Amino acid sequence: MNENVSNLPPKYDSTAVEKGRYQYWVDGKFFEAEGDKHKEPYTVVIPPPNVTGKLHIGHAWDTTLQDMITRIKRMQGYDVLYLPGMDHAGIATQAKVEAKLREQGTSRYDLGREKFLEKAWDWKEEYASFIREQWAMLGLGLDYSRERFTLDEGLSEAVKEVFVTLYEKDLIYRGEYIINWDPATKTALSDIEVIHEEVKGHFYHMRYPLKDEEGFIEIATTRPETMLGDTAVAVHPKDERYQHLIGKKVILPIVGREIEIIADDYVDKEFGSGAVKITPAHDPNDFEVGNRHNLERILVMNEDGTMNERAGKYKGMDRFECRKQLVADLQETGVLFEIEEHMHSVGHSERSGAVVEPYLSTQWFVNMQPLADQAVELQNGSEDEKVNFVPKRFEGTYLHWMENIRDWCISRQLWWGHRIPAWYHKETGEIYVGKEAPTDIENWEQDSDVLDTWFSSALWPFSTLNWPNTEDEDFKHFFPTNTLVTGYDIIFFWVARMIFQSKEFNDERPFEDVLIHGLVRDADGRKMSKSLGNGVDPMEVIEKYGADSLRYFLATGSTPGQDLRFQWEKVESTWNFINKIWNASRFVLMNMEELKYEDIDLSGEKSVADKWILTRLNQTIEQVNKNVERYDFGEAGRHLYNFIWDEFCDWYIEMAKLPLYGEDEEAKHTTRSVLAYVLDNTMRMLHPYMPFVTEEIWQHLPHQGESITRAAWPEVRDDLHDENAAEEMKRLVAIIRSVRNIRAEVDTPMSKQIELVVQANDTDIEGQLEANRHYLERFCNTSELTIATKVEVPEKAMSAVVTGADLYLPLEGLIDTEKEIARLQTELEKLNKEVERVQKKLGNEKFVSKAPEKVVAEEKQKEKDYLDKRAKVEERIKELRG
């Protein structure tokens, strides 16, 4: 299909260009994986966004990088699967739905579990549709025929399979432990769902009186309300101060309960008084001490952070209100004798922001050590077996966490999520774990808890491909996946868990590469947050500048692993770049003269400009390929930008006008062919960055196929490579630029014709310049042009030195001799610095002996060029001074 150029409007309008294009791609099934066994597969699974809200700028960055990778691979001929999906996000989604119910004057308890889950599913459907709309606006090439959700039927089967298998291997167990408890959402949290912040608090110093003798023992705590659950005071067994008290008892103030003084190595005898209170139900270390000494575990709080009946007269108070009242009471009795200010790290719930309470609870856990050991061992394998982190330094971050692993608390006191496949016998209390409910179900009651959201997300690379059915065609073809793209902030939450679960259940890595990016920050480098009000809605950016501008900015604004600063002016400069591309494309299309794809012919006589642009296209393809292979899209984008803006638009198109507006029909046809070929290949390389505008332009070019999404990725053509022509063109551009610079210096407009004298260094260069005289006459606007190896140097002239030639512009009456000498002096200083730099490099024996021969040769050539130029500048200064 070759649409008429008149369909390409004179002005670029991102809204008009992007409207309807995504639907065209989806309807054409261009993004659907074929499952073709003859093609090499390439799989990227989307990190599933939570169905709690709309996508933020971080999602836009993450998915843009994924989409770019998959578009490139699709064009390179792979059978690409870019798999979409969303996460049920247990705590976060339930909190949103409960908040909505509160606004309606009801609660989940009023509705009951089944009705509440219906409301949660309604919420999911509403927000899933928002997310799909945003994916469409971003232009993501997702295969919707394979879309998954972490709570869908297939994934539920996978979750049950994993839970039951791990339980049968004794890698999942149920036990009473101190866990991180969020009193706001009333659920357990894993260690990595706790954010630690430095908070100004206090050390409360107290004296617990001895039971059978005069005196007391001093202790200190940051959480005095937990003393109500104390069951011992511990000292170090080798602390001579307390040897005589070990085994004796103290009276717990306020409560009046007798508690024993025990000896345990856990106590640091150098810290404080050397004695510590032990509260096994409210502190993880005390819990372990309690186990060693068979101490009672007394829980003094309710799940919502209020005090329970074991707290005596403080029953019903909020924990922090209890603290205030208890401190006052302890001060009044003289037990509390000092309050010391103290900065300490306090855990907060990542989801609710509430202060996390270490809390005794019966929960389900994963025994992590065996799984972590396997995952670490995987990284000791070959490159073909291990997970390759990009940048490499993040492998160290991952391994450090895996090597210091703690058991994973996986049960959550929620209704929205994968319900734990465990049942308790109503009479015997026996536990049954299985994929299906017990047959005599009336005698059993299922665990009311659900699994941590990350438990199902950890299976994402294979559960989405219909595992545990390992004979499934998609699973066999597309697993393991190829590249995971994600932020460094969820290496522990998600990346690590996917690796150990895949190793355990598939005995191989879940993906070959993990491309790690940073966070999007504001222009000042601050983290985006609601409190600062500095967040950016990607849809607003698209509305203003289009998806292509946003995507190109996101893809090129940072190097792998680094944070990205969002700057509106940079998005705008990308929009200007697209305008440049649009205008250049319109010029090319207006000069196609009904050229069809099969008419493109590059075998004819080509000008030096033709040979140069084709050579530069080859070099750009090489550079882009090299950089995208290492995921450096910023560097690849820079090469594309320079080629398009500086070389294709600013130089080649201008030079192409000479044959296009001339009388030579063969030259016209060759020029049209070169223009069509170069623009076509450029649009293909730019397509992963800017899918919409490149498709629009490509559809108007002579082309084959229905969509650029399925067009072949550009390849280097050796038959179109001419280094000599590239050097010739480089010299012509240098001459034209020098002449334009001189004109600017002496305020001579381009419209005014000038005389130009070019002295070539040798006859070869003279011949090349003579053959391209028409370019110099046109772009320097000469009234007279002299090209020779020996010229009569004008007495009064502006001059310039380029590689291989000297330029003189006789500008009698326009030149200020003193100004020209000053300019040449500045030029001489620059050349002196360059000569000094290159000679220092060549004088370094290490560099000369270790650098590749080609690099050393290039430096020697630079030295020769700089010395030649310097000599000529010095000679010219001498001449002007006369």
Image: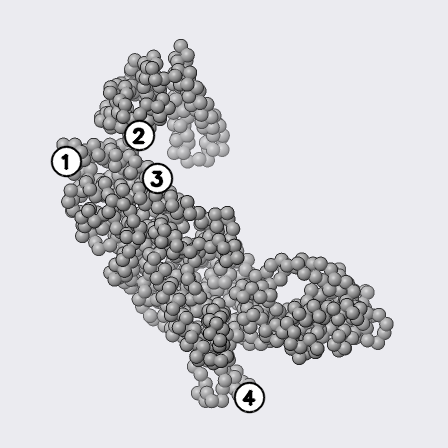
Query: Of callouts 1 and 4, which one flags the residue occurring earlier in the amino acid sequence?
Result: 4
Query: Of callouts 2 and 1, which one flags the residue occurring earlier in the amino acid sequence?
Result: 1
Residue tagged 2 = 733
Q: Secondary structure at mark 3?
A: helix
State left or right for residue 609 relative to residue 392. Answer: left
Identified by mark 3, the residue type is Asn
Residue 274 on image: x %, y %:
76, 64
Identified by mark 4, the residue type is Thr
Contact (Cβ within 8 Å) of mark 4 with mark 3: no
Residue tagged 3 = 642
Closer to us: mark 2 or mark 4?
2
Identified by mark 1, the residue type is Glu
Contact (Cβ within 8 Å) of mark 2 with mark 4: no
Count the labels in the image: 4
How far is the residue under mark 4 from the one under mark 3? 76 Å
Disc 1 residue crowd, few under 14, some 14–19, many 20+, Cα 10 Å:
few
In front here: 853 or 734?
734
Which of the 4 image quarters holds residue 235? bottom right
**Residue at screen point 40% across, 18% down:** 820
